Amino acid sequence: MKILIVGGGMGGTILANNLARRLNGELKSGGARITMLSASDKHMYQPGLLYLAVGRMTPDELYRDQAGLLEPGIEFHVDPAEEFQLDHNRVKTKSGKLYDYDTLVIATGSRMYPEGIPGLAEHAETFYTEASALKMFKRLQEFQGGRVVIAVGVPHKCPMAPLEITFMLHDYFKDRGLGDKVQLHYTYPINRIHSLENVAKWAAPEFDRLGIAYETFFNIKEVDGKNQILRSEEGAEIKYDLLIAIPAHKGMEVIEKNGLGQNGWIPTDRQKLNMEGRKNVFVLGDTTNIPISKAGSTAHFEADTLGENIAAMVKMGTPVRDYDGKVFCFIEAGKDRATYAMFNYQNPPDPKAPTKAVHWFKMAYNKLYWVSARGLL
Ligand SMILES: Cc1cc2nc3c(=O)[nH]c(=O)nc-3n(C[C@H](O)[C@H](O)[C@H](O)COP(=O)(O)OP(=O)(O)OC[C@H]3O[C@@H](n4cnc5c(N)ncnc54)[C@H](O)[C@@H]3O)c2cc1C
Protein backbone atom coordinates (compact mmCIF):
# COMPACT_ATOMS: atom_id res chain seq x y z
CA MET A 1 0.00 0.00 0.00
CA LYS A 2 1.33 3.45 -0.93
CA ILE A 3 0.66 5.85 1.95
CA LEU A 4 1.13 9.56 1.22
CA ILE A 5 1.17 12.02 4.15
CA VAL A 6 0.89 15.71 3.25
CA GLY A 7 2.17 17.89 6.12
CA GLY A 8 5.16 17.31 8.37
CA GLY A 9 3.93 19.04 11.53
CA MET A 10 2.77 17.48 14.79
CA GLY A 11 0.07 15.22 13.34
CA GLY A 12 1.87 14.12 10.17
CA THR A 13 5.15 13.37 11.96
CA ILE A 14 3.62 11.35 14.81
CA LEU A 15 1.51 9.37 12.32
CA ALA A 16 4.41 8.66 9.93
CA ASN A 17 6.61 7.37 12.77
CA ASN A 18 3.77 5.32 14.26
CA LEU A 19 3.12 3.69 10.86
CA ALA A 20 6.81 3.08 10.16
CA ARG A 21 7.10 1.08 13.38
CA ARG A 22 3.87 -0.86 12.85
CA LEU A 23 4.70 -1.58 9.22
CA ASN A 24 8.41 -2.24 9.65
CA GLY A 25 8.18 -5.67 7.94
CA GLU A 26 6.01 -4.40 5.07
CA LEU A 27 8.35 -1.45 4.46
CA LYS A 28 11.26 -3.87 4.15
CA SER A 29 9.40 -6.32 1.91
CA GLY A 30 7.92 -3.62 -0.33
CA GLY A 31 4.35 -4.34 0.84
CA ALA A 32 4.02 -0.76 2.10
CA ARG A 33 5.60 2.58 1.31
CA ILE A 34 5.34 5.80 3.36
CA THR A 35 6.01 9.16 1.70
CA MET A 36 5.77 12.54 3.43
CA LEU A 37 5.52 15.89 1.66
CA SER A 38 6.02 19.05 3.64
CA ALA A 39 6.46 22.78 3.15
CA SER A 40 9.60 23.07 5.28
CA ASP A 41 12.74 21.12 6.18
CA LYS A 42 12.29 22.39 9.76
CA HIS A 43 9.82 21.27 12.42
CA MET A 44 8.59 23.95 14.79
CA TYR A 45 7.43 23.32 18.36
CA GLN A 46 4.62 25.86 18.15
CA PRO A 47 3.66 25.89 21.87
CA GLY A 48 7.10 27.47 22.46
CA LEU A 49 5.87 30.66 20.73
CA LEU A 50 3.89 31.50 23.86
CA TYR A 51 7.11 31.62 25.90
CA LEU A 52 9.05 33.37 23.10
CA ALA A 53 6.55 36.25 23.16
CA VAL A 54 7.34 37.01 26.82
CA GLY A 55 11.09 36.35 26.62
CA ARG A 56 11.05 32.96 28.35
CA MET A 57 12.38 30.93 25.38
CA THR A 58 14.72 31.68 22.49
CA PRO A 59 14.00 30.89 18.81
CA ASP A 60 16.65 28.14 18.53
CA GLU A 61 14.71 26.09 21.13
CA LEU A 62 11.70 25.88 18.80
CA TYR A 63 13.22 23.98 15.86
CA ARG A 64 14.60 20.60 14.81
CA ASP A 65 15.41 19.23 11.34
CA GLN A 66 12.32 17.43 10.10
CA ALA A 67 14.26 14.62 8.41
CA GLY A 68 16.01 13.82 11.70
CA LEU A 69 12.67 13.28 13.48
CA LEU A 70 11.52 10.59 11.06
CA GLU A 71 12.01 6.83 11.38
CA PRO A 72 14.22 5.21 8.74
CA GLY A 73 12.16 3.98 5.82
CA ILE A 74 10.00 7.11 5.55
CA GLU A 75 10.60 8.97 2.28
CA PHE A 76 10.62 12.72 2.97
CA HIS A 77 10.42 15.55 0.43
CA VAL A 78 10.26 19.29 0.98
CA ASP A 79 7.86 19.83 -1.88
CA PRO A 80 4.51 21.41 -0.95
CA ALA A 81 1.32 19.95 -2.37
CA GLU A 82 -0.43 22.23 -4.83
CA GLU A 83 -3.13 20.13 -6.49
CA PHE A 84 -5.08 17.36 -4.80
CA GLN A 85 -6.30 15.21 -7.72
CA LEU A 86 -8.46 12.99 -5.52
CA ASP A 87 -10.36 11.34 -8.38
CA HIS A 88 -7.01 10.09 -9.73
CA ASN A 89 -5.45 9.21 -6.34
CA ARG A 90 -2.53 11.59 -6.82
CA VAL A 91 -1.11 14.89 -5.60
CA LYS A 92 0.79 17.40 -7.72
CA THR A 93 3.49 19.39 -5.97
CA LYS A 94 5.20 22.74 -6.38
CA SER A 95 8.09 21.07 -8.21
CA GLY A 96 5.60 19.68 -10.74
CA LYS A 97 5.97 16.06 -9.60
CA LEU A 98 2.98 13.75 -9.28
CA TYR A 99 2.76 11.51 -6.21
CA ASP A 100 0.23 8.70 -6.45
CA TYR A 101 -1.20 6.90 -3.43
CA ASP A 102 -3.55 4.22 -2.22
CA THR A 103 -4.12 6.05 1.07
CA LEU A 104 -3.75 9.81 1.50
CA VAL A 105 -3.51 11.68 4.81
CA ILE A 106 -3.88 15.47 4.82
CA ALA A 107 -2.29 17.21 7.83
CA THR A 108 -1.48 20.71 6.60
CA GLY A 109 -2.45 22.56 9.82
CA SER A 110 -3.95 26.04 10.19
CA ARG A 111 -2.88 29.69 10.26
CA MET A 112 -4.03 32.88 11.94
CA TYR A 113 -5.89 35.19 9.60
CA PRO A 114 -5.66 38.75 10.96
CA GLU A 115 -6.25 40.11 7.43
CA GLY A 116 -9.93 39.18 7.86
CA ILE A 117 -10.48 42.10 10.27
CA PRO A 118 -9.84 45.70 9.13
CA GLY A 119 -6.85 47.17 10.98
CA LEU A 120 -5.98 44.03 12.95
CA ALA A 121 -2.87 42.94 11.01
CA GLU A 122 -1.46 46.49 11.10
CA HIS A 123 -2.18 47.45 14.70
CA ALA A 124 -2.27 44.32 16.86
CA GLU A 125 0.62 42.30 18.20
CA THR A 126 0.29 38.54 17.76
CA PHE A 127 2.46 35.55 18.70
CA TYR A 128 1.40 32.67 16.42
CA THR A 129 4.53 32.90 14.21
CA GLU A 130 8.18 33.31 15.15
CA ALA A 131 8.41 36.80 13.60
CA SER A 132 5.24 38.07 15.28
CA ALA A 133 6.19 36.62 18.70
CA LEU A 134 9.60 38.33 18.53
CA LYS A 135 7.98 41.62 17.50
CA MET A 136 5.50 41.31 20.36
CA PHE A 137 8.31 40.77 22.87
CA LYS A 138 10.05 43.91 21.59
CA ARG A 139 6.81 45.94 22.05
CA LEU A 140 6.38 44.52 25.57
CA GLN A 141 9.89 45.59 26.52
CA GLU A 142 9.20 49.16 25.33
CA PHE A 143 5.80 49.35 27.03
CA GLN A 144 5.72 51.51 30.15
CA GLY A 145 2.08 51.29 31.21
CA GLY A 146 -1.55 51.65 30.20
CA ARG A 147 -4.35 49.37 29.06
CA VAL A 148 -3.33 46.12 27.38
CA VAL A 149 -6.23 44.54 25.52
CA ILE A 150 -6.06 40.81 24.72
CA ALA A 151 -8.66 40.24 22.00
CA VAL A 152 -9.66 36.73 20.94
CA GLY A 153 -11.24 35.58 17.67
CA VAL A 154 -12.51 32.05 16.97
CA PRO A 155 -11.71 29.47 15.75
CA HIS A 156 -8.02 29.47 16.66
CA LYS A 157 -5.44 26.80 17.39
CA CYS A 158 -4.47 26.06 20.98
CA PRO A 159 -7.66 26.65 22.94
CA MET A 160 -5.75 27.62 26.10
CA ALA A 161 -3.29 30.13 24.59
CA PRO A 162 -5.49 33.24 25.14
CA LEU A 163 -5.86 32.46 28.87
CA GLU A 164 -2.21 31.46 29.18
CA ILE A 165 -0.84 34.59 27.53
CA THR A 166 -3.05 36.72 29.79
CA PHE A 167 -1.71 35.04 32.95
CA MET A 168 1.84 35.26 31.58
CA LEU A 169 1.46 38.97 30.77
CA HIS A 170 0.23 39.54 34.30
CA ASP A 171 3.45 37.97 35.61
CA TYR A 172 5.61 39.75 33.03
CA PHE A 173 4.44 43.25 33.97
CA LYS A 174 4.52 42.48 37.71
CA ASP A 175 8.12 41.24 37.41
CA ARG A 176 9.03 44.49 35.63
CA GLY A 177 7.53 46.47 38.51
CA LEU A 178 4.68 47.75 36.30
CA GLY A 179 1.92 45.73 38.02
CA ASP A 180 -0.05 48.82 39.11
CA LYS A 181 0.62 50.77 35.89
CA VAL A 182 -0.84 48.14 33.54
CA GLN A 183 -4.49 47.13 33.25
CA LEU A 184 -5.15 43.87 31.44
CA HIS A 185 -8.44 43.65 29.55
CA TYR A 186 -9.51 40.38 27.87
CA THR A 187 -12.28 40.01 25.30
CA TYR A 188 -14.02 36.82 24.11
CA PRO A 189 -16.67 36.30 21.40
CA ILE A 190 -19.28 34.26 23.34
CA ASN A 191 -21.09 34.75 26.66
CA ARG A 192 -18.21 33.44 28.82
CA ILE A 193 -14.43 33.78 28.79
CA HIS A 194 -13.68 30.39 27.20
CA SER A 195 -15.47 28.12 24.75
CA LEU A 196 -15.27 25.14 27.16
CA GLU A 197 -17.76 25.87 29.92
CA ASN A 198 -15.81 24.32 32.81
CA VAL A 199 -12.60 26.05 31.71
CA ALA A 200 -14.48 29.38 31.69
CA LYS A 201 -15.88 28.60 35.18
CA TRP A 202 -12.37 27.89 36.44
CA ALA A 203 -10.68 30.88 34.74
CA ALA A 204 -13.14 33.69 35.56
CA PRO A 205 -12.47 33.70 39.35
CA GLU A 206 -8.71 33.49 38.62
CA PHE A 207 -9.02 36.63 36.45
CA ASP A 208 -11.12 38.32 39.19
CA ARG A 209 -8.50 37.51 41.82
CA LEU A 210 -5.72 39.05 39.70
CA GLY A 211 -7.77 42.13 38.75
CA ILE A 212 -7.90 41.19 35.05
CA ALA A 213 -10.97 42.80 33.42
CA TYR A 214 -12.94 40.88 30.80
CA GLU A 215 -15.69 41.50 28.32
CA THR A 216 -17.75 38.73 26.71
CA PHE A 217 -19.92 38.73 23.56
CA PHE A 218 -17.15 40.73 21.94
CA ASN A 219 -16.67 39.73 18.29
CA ILE A 220 -13.85 41.81 16.86
CA LYS A 221 -15.13 44.04 14.04
CA GLU A 222 -12.31 46.50 13.38
CA VAL A 223 -9.31 48.27 14.82
CA ASP A 224 -9.07 52.03 14.59
CA GLY A 225 -5.30 52.32 14.87
CA LYS A 226 -5.20 56.10 14.73
CA ASN A 227 -7.38 56.49 17.82
CA GLN A 228 -6.30 53.17 19.38
CA ILE A 229 -9.84 51.83 19.62
CA LEU A 230 -11.01 48.24 19.22
CA ARG A 231 -14.64 47.84 18.10
CA SER A 232 -16.93 44.83 18.29
CA GLU A 233 -19.76 43.61 16.05
CA GLU A 234 -22.00 44.06 19.12
CA GLY A 235 -21.29 47.83 19.16
CA ALA A 236 -18.81 47.97 22.06
CA GLU A 237 -15.58 49.99 21.96
CA ILE A 238 -12.41 49.62 24.02
CA LYS A 239 -9.54 52.08 24.07
CA TYR A 240 -6.16 50.37 24.19
CA ASP A 241 -2.53 51.36 24.65
CA LEU A 242 -1.29 47.97 23.48
CA LEU A 243 -3.41 45.52 21.54
CA ILE A 244 -2.59 41.81 21.55
CA ALA A 245 -4.74 39.56 19.38
CA ILE A 246 -5.37 35.88 18.89
CA PRO A 247 -7.00 36.28 15.46
CA ALA A 248 -9.53 33.83 14.07
CA HIS A 249 -7.85 31.11 12.00
CA LYS A 250 -8.31 29.44 8.64
CA GLY A 251 -6.93 26.21 7.25
CA MET A 252 -4.17 26.48 4.64
CA GLU A 253 -4.83 28.27 1.36
CA VAL A 254 -4.03 25.13 -0.66
CA ILE A 255 -7.06 23.40 0.93
CA GLU A 256 -9.38 26.28 0.01
CA LYS A 257 -7.94 26.60 -3.51
CA ASN A 258 -8.53 22.90 -4.18
CA GLY A 259 -12.12 23.20 -2.96
CA LEU A 260 -11.55 20.61 -0.23
CA GLY A 261 -13.23 22.64 2.49
CA GLN A 262 -14.60 26.08 3.26
CA ASN A 263 -12.01 28.33 4.93
CA GLY A 264 -9.55 25.46 4.67
CA TRP A 265 -11.46 23.14 7.06
CA ILE A 266 -11.99 19.72 5.49
CA PRO A 267 -15.30 17.96 6.25
CA THR A 268 -14.12 14.95 8.29
CA ASP A 269 -15.85 12.00 9.93
CA ARG A 270 -15.41 12.60 13.66
CA GLN A 271 -14.79 8.91 14.48
CA LYS A 272 -13.18 7.38 11.38
CA LEU A 273 -11.30 10.57 10.42
CA ASN A 274 -11.81 10.03 6.70
CA MET A 275 -12.68 12.98 4.49
CA GLU A 276 -16.43 12.90 3.97
CA GLY A 277 -17.25 11.03 0.75
CA ARG A 278 -13.68 9.64 0.37
CA LYS A 279 -12.81 6.25 1.85
CA ASN A 280 -9.04 6.44 1.15
CA VAL A 281 -8.45 10.07 2.22
CA PHE A 282 -7.92 10.80 5.92
CA VAL A 283 -7.62 14.15 7.67
CA LEU A 284 -5.53 14.86 10.73
CA GLY A 285 -5.01 17.75 13.17
CA ASP A 286 -6.01 21.38 12.77
CA THR A 287 -7.32 21.11 9.22
CA THR A 288 -10.34 18.93 10.07
CA ASN A 289 -13.70 20.63 10.50
CA ILE A 290 -14.42 18.56 13.63
CA PRO A 291 -15.70 20.98 16.31
CA ILE A 292 -13.06 20.11 18.92
CA SER A 293 -9.91 21.92 20.05
CA LYS A 294 -7.28 22.56 17.40
CA ALA A 295 -4.36 21.36 19.51
CA GLY A 296 -1.19 19.33 19.19
CA SER A 297 -2.64 16.77 21.56
CA THR A 298 -5.72 16.40 19.34
CA ALA A 299 -3.43 15.79 16.36
CA HIS A 300 -1.43 13.31 18.48
CA PHE A 301 -4.45 11.25 19.62
CA GLU A 302 -5.93 11.32 16.12
CA ALA A 303 -2.57 10.12 14.75
CA ASP A 304 -2.61 7.22 17.24
CA THR A 305 -6.04 6.17 15.92
CA LEU A 306 -5.06 6.56 12.28
CA GLY A 307 -1.75 4.73 12.80
CA GLU A 308 -3.57 1.75 14.21
CA ASN A 309 -6.29 1.86 11.53
CA ILE A 310 -4.07 2.32 8.47
CA ALA A 311 -1.70 -0.42 9.67
CA ALA A 312 -4.73 -2.66 10.25
CA MET A 313 -5.95 -1.91 6.74
CA VAL A 314 -2.57 -3.06 5.38
CA LYS A 315 -2.47 -6.19 7.53
CA MET A 316 -6.16 -7.11 7.89
CA GLY A 317 -7.98 -5.13 5.22
CA THR A 318 -10.09 -3.12 7.69
CA PRO A 319 -9.78 -0.30 10.25
CA VAL A 320 -10.19 -1.42 13.86
CA ARG A 321 -11.06 1.54 16.05
CA ASP A 322 -12.70 4.96 16.34
CA TYR A 323 -11.27 8.28 17.53
CA ASP A 324 -13.11 9.21 20.74
CA GLY A 325 -12.39 12.96 20.66
CA LYS A 326 -9.61 12.80 23.26
CA VAL A 327 -7.76 16.08 23.96
CA PHE A 328 -5.29 16.96 26.73
CA CYS A 329 -4.20 20.56 27.24
CA PHE A 330 -1.96 22.08 29.86
CA ILE A 331 -3.02 25.53 31.07
CA GLU A 332 -0.23 27.81 32.30
CA ALA A 333 -1.89 29.85 35.08
CA GLY A 334 0.88 32.27 36.09
CA LYS A 335 3.38 32.40 38.96
CA ASP A 336 4.86 29.04 37.95
CA ARG A 337 1.53 27.28 38.42
CA ALA A 338 -0.46 25.31 35.86
CA THR A 339 -3.43 23.02 35.54
CA TYR A 340 -4.77 20.90 32.69
CA ALA A 341 -7.95 20.00 30.82
CA MET A 342 -8.58 16.47 29.59
CA PHE A 343 -11.77 15.65 27.71
CA ASN A 344 -13.36 13.75 24.83
CA TYR A 345 -16.63 13.71 22.87
CA GLN A 346 -18.49 12.31 25.89
CA ASN A 347 -16.79 13.86 28.91
CA PRO A 348 -16.19 17.59 29.42
CA PRO A 349 -12.97 18.89 31.05
CA ASP A 350 -12.84 19.63 34.76
CA PRO A 351 -9.72 21.74 35.48
CA LYS A 352 -8.49 21.69 39.09
CA ALA A 353 -6.69 24.38 41.09
CA PRO A 354 -3.31 25.10 39.47
CA THR A 355 -0.16 23.71 41.08
CA LYS A 356 3.58 24.16 40.69
CA ALA A 357 3.95 20.44 39.96
CA VAL A 358 1.80 20.67 36.81
CA HIS A 359 3.75 23.75 35.66
CA TRP A 360 7.06 21.92 35.99
CA PHE A 361 5.57 18.94 34.19
CA LYS A 362 4.64 21.26 31.31
CA MET A 363 8.17 22.72 31.30
CA ALA A 364 9.54 19.18 31.08
CA TYR A 365 7.08 18.39 28.27
CA ASN A 366 8.45 21.39 26.32
CA LYS A 367 11.70 19.37 26.09
CA LEU A 368 10.06 15.94 25.86
CA TYR A 369 8.05 17.08 22.83
CA TRP A 370 10.86 15.92 20.55
CA VAL A 371 10.48 12.40 21.92
CA SER A 372 6.71 12.69 21.49
CA ALA A 373 7.10 13.82 17.83
CA ARG A 374 9.02 10.60 17.21
CA GLY A 375 5.92 8.85 18.53
CA LEU A 376 7.74 7.42 21.55
CA LEU A 377 5.66 9.15 24.23
C1 LIG B 1 1.30 29.81 20.38
C2 LIG B 1 0.82 28.41 20.27
C3 LIG B 1 0.72 27.63 21.43
C4 LIG B 1 0.27 26.32 21.34
N1 LIG B 1 0.22 25.57 22.50
C5 LIG B 1 -0.22 24.31 22.44
C6 LIG B 1 -0.24 23.51 23.62
O1 LIG B 1 0.17 23.93 24.70
N2 LIG B 1 -0.73 22.24 23.52
C7 LIG B 1 -1.19 21.74 22.33
O2 LIG B 1 -1.63 20.59 22.30
N3 LIG B 1 -1.17 22.48 21.19
C8 LIG B 1 -0.69 23.74 21.21
N4 LIG B 1 -0.64 24.49 20.06
C9 LIG B 1 -1.30 24.00 18.83
C10 LIG B 1 -0.49 23.02 18.02
O3 LIG B 1 0.79 23.51 17.74
C11 LIG B 1 -1.24 22.71 16.73
O4 LIG B 1 -2.58 22.44 17.01
C12 LIG B 1 -0.60 21.51 16.04
O5 LIG B 1 0.70 21.86 15.60
C13 LIG B 1 -1.45 21.03 14.87
O6 LIG B 1 -0.79 19.97 14.23
P1 LIG B 1 -1.01 19.75 12.67
O7 LIG B 1 -0.19 18.57 12.31
O8 LIG B 1 -2.45 19.76 12.35
O9 LIG B 1 -0.41 21.06 11.99
P2 LIG B 1 1.05 21.67 12.07
O10 LIG B 1 1.80 21.14 13.22
O11 LIG B 1 0.88 23.14 11.96
O12 LIG B 1 1.75 21.12 10.75
C14 LIG B 1 1.33 21.47 9.46
C15 LIG B 1 2.41 21.01 8.48
O13 LIG B 1 1.92 21.11 7.16
C16 LIG B 1 2.95 21.61 6.34
N5 LIG B 1 2.31 22.19 5.15
C17 LIG B 1 1.61 23.33 5.03
N6 LIG B 1 1.19 23.48 3.76
C18 LIG B 1 1.62 22.40 3.08
C19 LIG B 1 1.51 21.97 1.73
N7 LIG B 1 0.88 22.69 0.81
N8 LIG B 1 2.08 20.79 1.36
C20 LIG B 1 2.76 20.03 2.27
N9 LIG B 1 2.89 20.40 3.57
C21 LIG B 1 2.33 21.57 3.96
C22 LIG B 1 3.68 22.61 7.23
O14 LIG B 1 5.00 22.87 6.75
C23 LIG B 1 3.69 21.84 8.55
O15 LIG B 1 4.79 20.97 8.58
C24 LIG B 1 -0.11 25.78 20.09
C25 LIG B 1 0.01 26.54 18.93
C26 LIG B 1 0.49 27.84 19.01
C27 LIG B 1 0.64 28.65 17.75
Image (cartoon, helix red, strand yellow):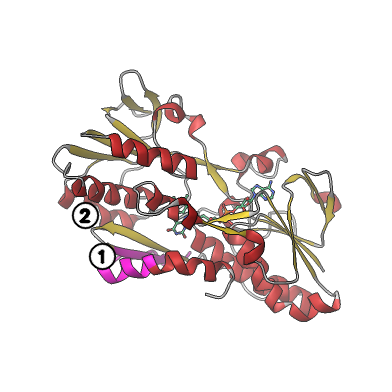
Mark pair 2, 1: CA separation: 10 Å
Q: Secondary structure at mark 2?
A: helix
Q: Residue at x 49, y 54 (%)?
A: 60
Residue 212 seen in render: yes
Contact check, label 2 and label 1, Cβ < 8 Å: yes
- Earlier in the chain: of badge 2 and badge 1, it is 2
The segment highlighted magenta reads 338-363
Residue 319 seen in render: no
Badge 1 amino acid: Pro
- Please tell me in which quadrant of the rendered image residue 336 appears: bottom left
Image quadrant where one finds the N terminus: bottom right
The residue at which mark 2 appears reads as 206
The answer to if 360 sits in the magenta stretch is yes
Q: Is residue 255 left or right of residue 31?
A: left
Instruction: Point out residue 203 in the picture as x, y percentages from the top left corner.
Output: 26, 54
Q: Is residue 173 left or right of residue 18?
A: left
- Please tell me in which quadrant of the rendered image residue 106 appears: bottom right
Going by the picture, which residue comes out furthest to the top? 226
Q: Is residue 315 left or right of residue 17?
A: right
